[in-house]
């Protein structure tokens, strides 16, 4: 019996095991394993050069792995039409034929995306104020970004990747993107993977977060769990240091007699102890947490080098 790459609500949308990708002597992805469940919004986060784009290129069949295994809808994605017809990959540096206009992009989209919604695309075109009859190479960076975002949303592909294509958009246009993504995702569930360094802007969209750093998975966790996995303790230096002794310290800051220390998760009794010691507790944003964790790992890497 011939297998078909038909997305289901049970099987993982993506399964990666022991994935390594080398370019010559450089290891871009180093023994990475993770699973992407269907019909969730994932954040693939990390610093520039961390390996995010390389992972997405491997998942979308644009390159071969050096070792390990990649399965998308249960099959290898490379040169696999059954898999690729269910994928939409939108990147910042999206290229189109030189003589194309936006109208040509949207007219041709139904050839590639069977779930294409032309009415939704028209709504987005109006909201992004996109000129349809201007040559692609004459568009501003923001207008070019809008073309990619519209394709990514209106395609309604079962697995959609956004590799920072919205960086050229202004704050108002980015908010339109976030709002329409959430609204349409609620009505038409699919698996979405967002890669961005605008972490605080997308934090409320994400249901699961995968953080990659120096080619390795640093964090792979439910977004809500991650948000509650660290707390900043603020107060008199002596009291703060006494409280954080023996705890997982992610970051220290302070001035004069005051200290601010970010620590790992606290139990209810830990929090009660902090309050009784006159200390203030504040949540850590997703962006702050990732920055703290990344910096801790960078320090450990430097010390072991």
Image (tube, grey):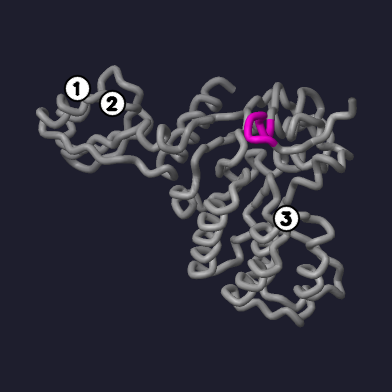
Note whether 161 is above or below 152 in the view shown.
Answer: above
- Determine crowd level at label 3: few under 14, some 14-19, many 20+ residues with C-alpha closer than 10 A: some
Q: Nearer the viewer, residue 80 or 216?
A: 80
Task: Identify the image quadrant of residue 285.
Answer: top left
For the residues marked 1 and 3, what is the alpha-carbon distance in whole angstroms? 51 Å
Residue receiving disc 2? 266
Report if residue 218 lies within the magenta region: no
Residue in the image at 65% along x and 41% along y: 52
Which corner quadrant holds the N terminus?
Answer: top right
Image x and y of residue 205, in percent: 48, 49
Q: Nearer the viewer, residue 90 or 140?
A: 90
Q: Nearer the viewer, residue 227 or 232?
A: 227
Task: Identify the image quadrant of residue 134.
Answer: bottom right
Report if residue 10 lies within the magenta region: yes
Per the rendered image, the range of residues in magenta is: 8-14
Image x and y of residue 117, in percent: 69, 63
User: Which residue sits furthest front?
Assistant: 1
Residue receiving disc 1? 269
- Determine crowd level at label 2: few under 14, some 14-19, many 20+ residues with C-alpha closer than 10 A: some
Residue in the image at 28% along x and 34% along y: 261
Q: Nearer the viewer, residue 251 or 189?
A: 189
Circle 2 or circle 3, nearest the eye: 3
Q: Is residue 142 left or right of residue 227?
A: right
Image x and y of residue 199, in percent: 49, 49
Q: Which mark is residue 64?
A: none
Task: Identify the image quadrant of residue 235.
Answer: top left
For the residues marked 2 and 3, what is the alpha-carbon distance in whole angstroms? 45 Å
């Amino acid at each position: 019996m011939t297998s078909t790459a038909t997305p289901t609500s049970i099987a993982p949308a993506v399964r990666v095991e022991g994935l390594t990708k080398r370019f010559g002597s450089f290891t871009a992805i180093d023994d990475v394993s993770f699973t992407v469940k269907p019909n969730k919004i994932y954040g693939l986060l990390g610093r520039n050069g961390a390996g995010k784009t390389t992972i997405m290129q491997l998942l979308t069949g644009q390159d071969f792995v050096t070792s390990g295994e990649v399965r998308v809808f249960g099959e290898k994605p490379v040169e696999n039409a059954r898999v690729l017809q269910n994928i939409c990959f939108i990147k910042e540096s999206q290229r189109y034929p030189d003589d194309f206009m936006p109208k040509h992009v949207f007219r041709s989209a139904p050839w590639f995306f069977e779930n294409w919604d032309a009415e939704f695309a028209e709504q987005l075109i109006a909201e992004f104020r996109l000129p349809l009859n201007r040559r692609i190479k004459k568009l501003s960076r923001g207008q070019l970004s809008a073309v990619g975002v519209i394709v990514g949303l209106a395609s309604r592909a079962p697995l959609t990747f956004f590799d920072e294509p919205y960086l050229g958009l202004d704050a108002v246009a980015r908010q339109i993107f976030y709002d329409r993504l959430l609204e349409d995702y609620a009505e038409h569930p699919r698996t979405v993977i967002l890669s961005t360094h605008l972490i605080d802007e997308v934090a409320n969209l994400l249901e699961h977060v995968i953080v990659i750093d120096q080619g390795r998975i640093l964090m792979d966790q439910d977004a809500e769990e991650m948000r509650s996995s660290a707390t900043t303790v603020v107060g008199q230096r002596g009291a703060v240091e006494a409280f954080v002794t023996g705890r997982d310290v992610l970051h220290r800051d302070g001035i004069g007699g005051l200290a601010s220390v970010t620590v790992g998760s606290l139990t209810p009794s830990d929090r009660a102890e902090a309050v009784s010691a006159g200390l203030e507790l504040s949540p850590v944003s997703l962006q702050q947490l990732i920055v703290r964790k990344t910096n801790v790992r960078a320090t450990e890497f430097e010390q072991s080098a």
